[in-house]
Image: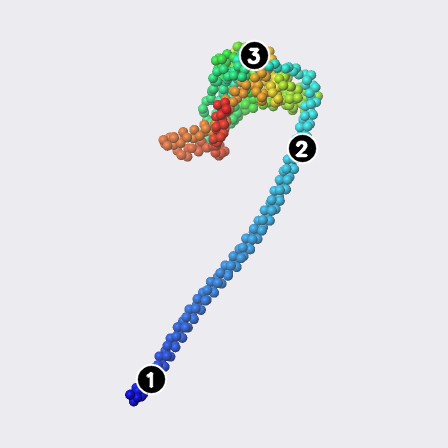
């Protein structure tokens, strides 16, 4: 057994000796392969590291650029803040200058008012000496049995890109004391558009007055009143007089308005009905003009400013100054001649006089009346004073004014209805979509119809 083991060990030793060289070759090969692999790994790692270094370098460049951008932006922000602070400082200085200017301006205005007040007070004694002041009586019984007609007109047209679309109405009411006795007469102006009218607003106002004269004439035929009141003057404002560049249509409307005024005046004259224009806002300065020789600045003081210091509650006075002459009155005279009126009638109807009455604690109101009505001034003052509201507006005038208000909301309703119907024509093919631009407002403003304003208008029209 031992011998066999020795033989086996001898064989193994011999085998190992024979294969030793082969094993060394294998080991060397494995070492070479391992080295090659390690070199490859090292090269790949270096390549990756180089790539990462390149990216890091790019990032560093970007960070540098970003830092420069941030610094630039910070500099710009700082400059902007500095400029903003400077601008705020300038605005604050400007605001202070504005406030200072306004403050100084109000001081100057007050100084002018003080001088104005001193001037008008200097005239008080002269005015009292040259003015006959009367006290109107309050007579409820007289107003209860007296039928009064009051009329007013309102206008609020819209200026479209294509033309001006006028909108005006007039109302006449019949009253006794503080009650409306019948359904009012309401008329609206003729629907039309003016593409080439040079003074559309003035023409609209003039036609509104013509409509008022016509409605008042119709009311006289219907109710046969004892007195007629017009909200506003009887005589057209001089600013409505056609100029040299007026259109033929404007001139014709002006003549027609003068003719309507004379027809109304003549009808009242024939029926012996006093007619009065109740002027709530007036800039007339006729009273001071009488004393311009002794005080040159007196002619620029308004009548209401002077009489505000003279008339007490319920008092009235007739001015005795020269009555209005010129283009408007001449047109009234021509209209009277065309109607076949006599010279005496034309004189009685076109010699207008002004009176002032204080019906409340507000400033006095001007009354405009033709010459033939002067003998009825006491009764007119009684009616106005007895039926006046807290604001001094007589009841009949107040009701006519309330019913004729053409507010912006009402005007916009008309405009929106017009646009809606135009859309229907587009659907039918009678208009093209681009034609709707003709209905755009002249200055590009939108049509606004606020619900609260519309409801408020309805409440006012319905009496609250």
Closest to the observer: 50 or 238? 50
Quadrant of residue 382 in the image? top right
Q: Residue at (43%, 71%) from the top-left corner? A: 42
Which image quarter: residue 5? bottom left
Q: Which residue is mark 3?
A: 141
Residue 39 located left or right of residue 108? left
Question: In this rendering, is residue 279 above or below 451?
Answer: above
Question: Measuring 45% from the left and 65% from the top, which residue is drawn there?
Answer: 51
Q: Percent x, y for residue 289?
A: 66, 21
Residue occupying the far bottom of the picture: 3
- Residue 79, visible in the rendered structure: yes
Q: Which mark is residue 16?
A: 1
List x then y, in percent, for residue 147: 53, 13
Q: Earlier in the sequence, mark 2 or mark 1?
A: 1
Position in image of residue 104 (x %, y %): 66, 35
Give the mark count: 3
Residue at the outermost front position? 1
Q: Which residue is mark 2?
A: 107
- How far is mark 3 from mark 2, CA to CA? 51 Å
Horizontally, residue 306 falls left or right of residue 453, namely right
Whichever of labels 3 and 2 marks the residue nearer the N terminus, that label is: 2
Q: Nearer the viewer, mark 3 or mark 2?
A: 3
The answer to whether marks 3 and 1 mark residues whose Cβ atoms lie closer than 8 Å is no
Lateral position of residue 188 relative to residue 286, left or right = left
Residue 354, by quadrant, is top right
For residue 5, above or below residue 181: below
Residue at 36 percent of width and 78 percent of height: 29
Location of the N terminus by quadrant is bottom left
Q: Give whichever of 156, 450 is nearer the camera.
A: 450
Secondary structure under the numbered disc 1 in the rendered image: helix
Q: Residue at x 67, y 32 (%)?
A: 108
- Residue 95 x, y percent position in the rendering: 62, 40
């Amino acid at each position: 057994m031992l011998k066999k083991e020795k033989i086996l060990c001898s064989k193994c030793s011999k085998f190992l000796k024979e294969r030793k060289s082969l094993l060394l070759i294998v080991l060397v090969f494995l070492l070479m392969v391992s080295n090659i692999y390690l070199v490859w790994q090292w090269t790949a790692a270096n390549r990756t590291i180089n790539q990462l270094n390149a990216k890091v370098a790019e990032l560093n460049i970007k960070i540098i650029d970003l830092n420069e951008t941030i610094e630039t932006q910070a500099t710009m922000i700082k400059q902007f803040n500095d400029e903003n602070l400077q601008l705020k400082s300038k605005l604050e200085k400007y605001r202070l200058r504005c406030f200072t200017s306004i403050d100084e301006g109000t001081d100057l205005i007050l100084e002018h008012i003080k001088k104005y007040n001193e001037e008008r007070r200097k005239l008080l004694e002269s005015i009292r000496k040259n003015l006959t002041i009367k006290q109107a009586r309050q007579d409820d019984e007289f107003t209860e049995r007296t039928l009064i007609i009051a009329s007013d007109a309102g206008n609020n047209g819209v200026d479209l890109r294509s033309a001006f679309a006028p909108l005006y109405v007039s109302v006449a009411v019949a009253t006794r004391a503080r009650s409306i006795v019948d359904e009012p007469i309401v008329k609206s102006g003729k629907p039309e558009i003016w593409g080439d009218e040079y003074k559309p607003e003035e023409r609209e106002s003039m036609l509104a007055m013509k409509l008022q004269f016509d409605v008042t004439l119709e009311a006289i035929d219907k109710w046969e009143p004892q007195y007629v009141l017009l909200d506003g003057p009887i005589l057209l404002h001089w600013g409505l007089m056609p100029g040299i560049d007026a259109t033929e249509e404007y001139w014709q409307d002006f003549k027609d308005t003068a003719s309507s005024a004379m027809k109304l005046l003549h009808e009242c004259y024939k029926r012996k009905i006093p007619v009065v224009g109740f002027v709530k806002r007036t800039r007339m300065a006729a009273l001071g003009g009488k004393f311009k020789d002794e005080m040159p600045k007196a002619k620029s003081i308004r009548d209401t400013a002077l009489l505000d210091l003279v008339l007490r509650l319920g008092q009235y006075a007739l001015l005795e100054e020269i009555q209005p002459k010129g283009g408007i009155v001449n047109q009234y005279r021509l209209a009277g001649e065309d109607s076949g009126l006599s010279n005496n009638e034309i004189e009685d109807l076109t010699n207008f006089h002004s009176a002032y009455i204080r019906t409340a604690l507000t400033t006095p109101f001007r009354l405009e009346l033709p010459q033939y009505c002067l003998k009825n001034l006491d009764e007119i003052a009684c009616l106005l004073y007895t039926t006046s509201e807290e604001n001094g507006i007589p009841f009949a005038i107040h009701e006519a004014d309330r019913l004729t208000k053409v507010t912006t909301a009402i005007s916009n309703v008309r405009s929106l209805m017009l646009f809606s119907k135009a859309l229907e024509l587009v659907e039918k093919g009678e208009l093209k979509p681009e034609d709707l631009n003709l209905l755009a407002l002249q200055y590009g403003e939108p049509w606004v119809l606020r619900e609260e304003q519309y409801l408020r208008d309805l409440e006012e029209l319905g009496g609250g």
